[in-house]
Image (spheres, helix red, strand yellow):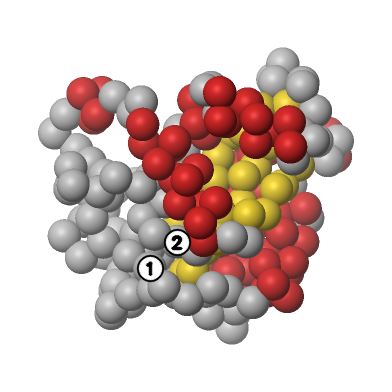
Amino acid sequence: MELLDLIKKRRSIRKYQDRQIPKEDLEKIIEAGLYAPNAGGGQRTFICGVHSKELTETIGKLNIAHFDKSKLVGSYVSKEQPSIIDDPTIKNGFYGAPTVCVVFAQKNFLYSIPDAFCCAENMVLEATELGISSCIIARAEETFENELGKKLLKDWQIPENYIARCFVVLGYCDGAYPAAKPRKDGRSRIIE
């Protein structure tokens, strides 16, 4: 598939089948993240792939536990693929995806957030190429700010100077794969 076609095909999926992705595909998705652009070529991001539906569900509940939805008043995401903003009955910030990748970056590095999200973008594009659905999820920093979260980071041997910046959830779309939304006009300009 040509790159622009792949970009146009990718969707943020928030409804997942109860079916795990192959470990080999997870390894390819992580590899794509490791080849993402990064500030100064520093390769500072660290990706932890959680290939366990049970553990992914636990972390997904931690992700949503202290989410302040009041900051998003008036927001709306999707009828077909509702987010936690649209549906208050959703209690898992990872929407039932069986796999999640946690993207970590250095705490006090100016470009750690852009580095992490470039990494996540590469990962969702590779997932799309492999026929795996995905969604980039924020709220990573606060997800691990609790006793269980700190224990997980210690068990995973995440260096103390690293912080979770985002998640990439992975699985297979439950239901019809959504079509592209029309692009809004007036969002670009070329100056010569």
Instruction: Report the side of 69 relative to 33 (left or right).
Output: left
Image disc number at residue 97: 2
Instruction: Report the side of 187 relative to 169 (left or right).
Output: left
Residue 19 position, x and y percent, is 47, 76
Instruction: Confirm or deny contact between disc 2 and disc 1 (CB under 8 A).
Output: yes
Number of dots carrying numbers: 2
The amino acid marked with disc number 1 is: Tyr
Q: Nearer the viewer, residue 72 or 183?
A: 72
Instruction: Report the side of 21 relative to 46 (left or right).
Output: left
Q: Nearer the viewer, residue 71 or 8?
A: 71
Residue marked by disc 1: 16
Residue under the point 74% across and 66% down: 27
Image disc number at residue 137: none
Residue under the point 36% across and 55% down: 95
Q: Secondary structure at mark 2?
A: loop
Residue sitting farthest toward the top:
108
Judge whether residue 96 can be spotted in this image: yes
Residue 162 position, x and y percent, is 73, 27
Residue 109 position, x and y percent, is 73, 20
**Quarter of the image where one finds residue 38:** top right
Whichever of callouts 2 and 1 sits on the residue coming sooner in the sequence is 1
The amino acid marked with disc number 2 is: Ala
120 shown above or below 153: below
61 shown above or below 168: above
Q: Secondary structure at mark 1?
A: loop
CA gap, disc 2 to disc 1? 5 Å
Residue under the point 29% across and 45% down: 91
Q: Nearer the viewer, residue 23 or 191?
A: 23
Instruction: Report the side of 100 relative to 32 (left or right).
Output: left
Badge 1 crowding class, 10 Å Cα cut-off, few under 14, some 14 to 19, many 20 or more, is: many
Judge whether residue 192 can be spotted in this image: no
Q: Nearer the viewer, residue 114 or 164?
A: 164
